[in-house]
Image (cartoon, rainbow, N blue to C red):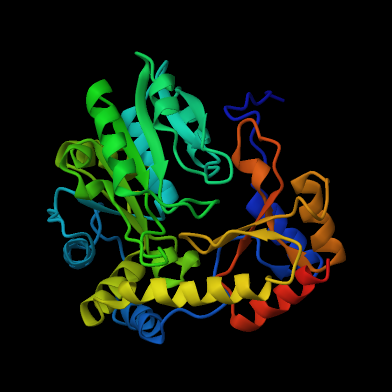
C-alpha cells in the first residue's frame, strides 16, 4: 500500500471540532465553538426558502450573483464609506476561510514569508504552508493584545510577502485603532507587502468604538484582500458564505484560485442574502448593541466570580483569566470543566505558535440570555 506523505503533518482535528464533540458527549453548555444558539432573522430564513422554491438552485456566476454583489457594494458604501466596483472588486465565496485560503494561495509561494500575529485563528498557517511559504509569528502584547508594530517591523525580511491581520480579533476581542491602520499602512508601503485582512466580525464592535477597515485607507486598499462573513453578520454560520473585496488586479488572481477550489458559493443562499439586504440594508448596524448587551450580561453575571474579566472590545468572544482558580494548563482545564461542570470553552494556547505563560479561556457569548446566565452561575461557583 502506497504511503501517504502529509503536506500538513502537524495538523490534526481542530480544537473547535474536538470541544464541540466533547460538549455534545457530556451534554455540556457549548460556549466553545463560535456560533449562535438562537435563530437568524425570520425574514432571512423565509428568503432562503423562497429562493429555493423559486428555482435559484443552479450554478451562480463564479464571482457571485450580480444582485448580491450590487447589494454588497451598497453595504460597503453605507457602513465603510467606500465605493467598490461589484464586478471587478467583490467576489462571493463559500465562507471567509475559503476566501482567505484563495488569497494566500494566489499571492505567496515557495520561499516566501507571511507574518501572522499570535494568537491567531488556526486556518492561516495551514494555508501558508500549503502555498509553500513560511509563517513568521509575532506575538501581540500580553494582556492588552495590542500590536507591537516595532516588533512587526523587526520581523520583516526580504522574503516577506504578506501580513495577515484580524480585527475585531478572534480569540481576544481586541480591535484595531486608526493609529494601528496607519502603522500597518506605513509598513506595507515601505516594504511592498500585501495584506490579508480578516474582518468577519466587522459589525461586532462595542463601547462606541468604530471598526477600521483596510478598505478605508487608500494605500492599504490597493494592496489588500479584505474578507467578510455572512455567517457572523446574520447568525447563519452553517450557510458558509462570505465575500472578499480586493482591487481588480488582486481580485483577478484570487478568482483564478477560487474557481478551482469551490467555483461558486451556494446559489439560494446568495439570493436570500441579496433579497434580505435589499429589504433591510440597516440590519448589520443593529448588531453592536445586540451583542454588547449579551457581553455585558455575561460579564456582570461573573462579577462575583474569581475570574479576572476585561470586557471584550469586539467579536462575540470573551476571555476569562483563571489564574486565581487553577494552575492547570488551559487545554486540560477546558476538558475537565466540560466533563465535570458541564460547560465547554476554548483554550487560548492553541492559537499560538509558542504559547506564553498565561491562564486564559475563550467563551462564546453568542448564546441566549438564559444560557449565559446559567453558564455564569456555574462559573461563579468554582
Does residue 332 sit above or below 159 in this rendering? below
Q: Nearer the viewer, residue 63 or 112?
A: 112
Q: Residue at x 46, y 70 (%)?
A: 236
Question: Horizontal placement of 106 versus 172: left or right?
Answer: left
Regarding residue 71, the answer to whether it shows in the image is yes
Q: Position of residue 201 (x, y in %)?
A: 41, 59
Q: Position of residue 175 (x, y in %)?
A: 42, 52
**Residue 211's quadrant in the figure?**
bottom left
Does residue 268 sit above or below 216 in this rendering? below
In the rendered image, the residue lying farthest to the right is 340
Could you tell me which quadrant the C terminus lies in? bottom right
Question: Horizontal placement of 28 versus 241: left or right?
Answer: right
**Residue 287's quadrant in the figure?**
bottom left
Could you tell me which quadrant the N terminus lies in? top right
Q: Residue at x 55, y 66 (%)?
A: 35
Q: Residue at x 37, y 52 (%)?
A: 199
Regarding residue 13, the answer to whether it shows in the image is no
Does residue 378 sit above or below 45 in this rendering? above
Q: Nearer the viewer, residue 23 or 340?
A: 340
Give the total of numbered labels.
0
Q: Position of residue 170 (x, y in %)?
A: 51, 51
Q: Position of residue 351 (x, y in %)?
A: 60, 42
In the rendered image, the residue lying farthest to the top is 158
Q: Nearer the viewer, residue 279 or 55?
A: 279
Amino acid at each position: 500500500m502506497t504511503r501517504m506523505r502529509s503536506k500538513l503533518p502537524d495538523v490534526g482535528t481542530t480544537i473547535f471540532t474536538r470541544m464541540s464533540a466533547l460538549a455534545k458527549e457530556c451534554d455540556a453548555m457549548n460556549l466553545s465553538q463560535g456560533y449562535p444558539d438562537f435563530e437568524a432573522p425570520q425574514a432571512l430564513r423565509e428568503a432562503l426558502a423562497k429562493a429555493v422554491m423559486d428555482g435559484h438552485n443552479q450554478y451562480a456566476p463564479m464571482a457571485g450573483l450580480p444582485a448580491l454583489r450590487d447589494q454588497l457594494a451598497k453595504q460597503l458604501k453605507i457602513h465603510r464609506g467606500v465605493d467598490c466596483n461589484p464586478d471587478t472588486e467583490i467576489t462571493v465565496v463559500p465562507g471567509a476561510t475559503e476566501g482567505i485560503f484563495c488569497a494566500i494561495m494566489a499571492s505567496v509561494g515557495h520561499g516566501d514569508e507571511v507574518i501572522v500575529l499570535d494568537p491567531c485563528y488556526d486556518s492561516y498557517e495551514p494555508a501558508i504552508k500549503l502555498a509553500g511559504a513560511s509563517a513568521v509569528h509575532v506575538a501581540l502584547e500580553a494582556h492588552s493584545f495590542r500590536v507591537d508594530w516595532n516588533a512587526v517591523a523587526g520581523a520583516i525580511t526580504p522574503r516577506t510577502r504578506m501580513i495577515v491581520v484580524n480585527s475585531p480579533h478572534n480569540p481576544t476581542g481586541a480591535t484595531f485603532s486608526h493609529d494601528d491602520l496607519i502603522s500597518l499602512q506605513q509598513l506595507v508601503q515601505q516594504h511592498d507587502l500585501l495584506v490579508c485582512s480578516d474582518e468577519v466580525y466587522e459589525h461586532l464592535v462595542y463601547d462606541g468604538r468604530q471598526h477600521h477597515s483596510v478598505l478605508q485607507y487608500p494605500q492599504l486598499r490597493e494592496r489588500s484582500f479584505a474578507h467578510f462573513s455572512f455567517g457572523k453578520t446574520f447568525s447563519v454560520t452553517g450557510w458558509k458564505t462570505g465575500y472578499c473585496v480586493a482591487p481588480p488586479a488582486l481580485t483577478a488572481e484570487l478568482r483564478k484560485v477560487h474557481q478551482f477550489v469551490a467555483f461558486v458559493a451556494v446559489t439560494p443562499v446568495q439570493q436570500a442574502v441579496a433579497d434580505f439586504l435589499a429589504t433591510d440594508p440597516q440590519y448589520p448596524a443593529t448588531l453592536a448593541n445586540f451583542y454588547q448587551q449579551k457581553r455585558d450580561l455575561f460579564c456582570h453575571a461573573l462579577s462575583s466570580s474569581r475570574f479576572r474579566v476585561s470586557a471584550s472590545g469586539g467579536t462575540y468572544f470573551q476571555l476569562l483569566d483563571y489564574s486565581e482558580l487553577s494552575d492547570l494548563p488551559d487545554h486540560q482545564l477546558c476538558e475537565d470543566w466540560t466533563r465535570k461542570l458541564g460547560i465547554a470553552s476554548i483554550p487560548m494556547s492553541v492559537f499560538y505558535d509558542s504559547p506564553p505563560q498565561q491562564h486564559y479561556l475563550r467563551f462564546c457569548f453568542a448564546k441566549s440570555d438564559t444560557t449565559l446566565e446559567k453558564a455564569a452561575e456555574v462559573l461563579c461557583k468554582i
